[in-house]
Amino acid sequence: MNEAVLLDIEGTVSPVGAIRDSLFPYARERLAEWVRRPEPEIGRIVDAVRLAMGDVGADSAAVTGRLEQWSDLGIRAEPLRALEGLIWLGGFAAGELSAPFYADVPAVLEEWAGAGVPVYVFCAESELVQQLWFANSQFGDLSGGIGGYFDSASEGEGDEPLSYRLIAKVIGVDPERVRFVSGAVAKLDAAAAAGMRTVGVSRIEDGSPEVGAHPRVARFSAIATRG
């Protein structure tokens, strides 16, 4: 068994677009409501938006407009990421959000945990999003066996080999002893270039995406038997 496993999320443990199609619309619809909340943490986020706008006196409507603009354009500005995180925390706590996982994932995570295989997660979304995702699946809390989370803000983009070398250094495992699992060929190529072993997940449910020359599995459960 591998010394460590590094997992992507969308197209790997969850359907392609699962985060994008659920969390982001949920937050987008609630930006205006949350901007008006009196909590100090919200106030700090609002001030950060005003600073980015160059208008320290901007009212809540203007601040909301800028946040919505960032959201619509896919601009991952830090104030927006911070506010979205708070909104998602509230949504999961209220039971209004649940993270969809493929049914074959929990058993594999449990098998790896039982075998003492450390498992980590790396995707573009923030570490907070990843933590919430694994802790709030439709199968319950799946975060128990996850040793750490990495995102593009902390370790770099998923299509850059340096990102994977940095992760290997942080977790203290040589790259060649890490198995990276993803359904995105650009990420798989970058991980392989960094020296990691790779598995390309190409699920029929996700349209059997191209995984290039990487070892291919159609089910997550097949990874557990790969050496």
Image: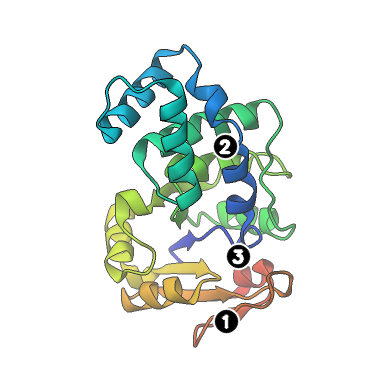
* Residue identified by numbered label 1: 210
Looking at the picture, how far across and down is residue 93, in whole percent?
64, 27
Horizontal side of residue 68 vs 189, given as left or right: right
Q: Neighbour class for label 1 at 10 Å: few (<14), some, many (≥20)?
A: some
Which residue is the extreme one toward the bottom? 213
> What is the secondary structure assignment of the residue under circle 3?
loop
In this view of the protein, can residue 24 be seen by the observer? yes
The disc labelled 3 sits on which kind of residue?
A: Gly
Horizontal side of residue 109 vs 182, given as left or right: right
Between discs 1 and 3, the one toward the N terminus: 3
* Residue identified by numbered label 2: 27
CA gap between label 1 and label 3 equals: 11 Å
* Residue identified by numbered label 3: 11
Looking at the picture, how far across and down is residue 181, in whole percent?
51, 68
Looking at the picture, how far across and down is residue 85, in whole percent?
49, 34
Between discs 2 and 1, the one toward the N terminus: 2
Q: Residue 76 or 141: which is nearer the viewer? A: 76
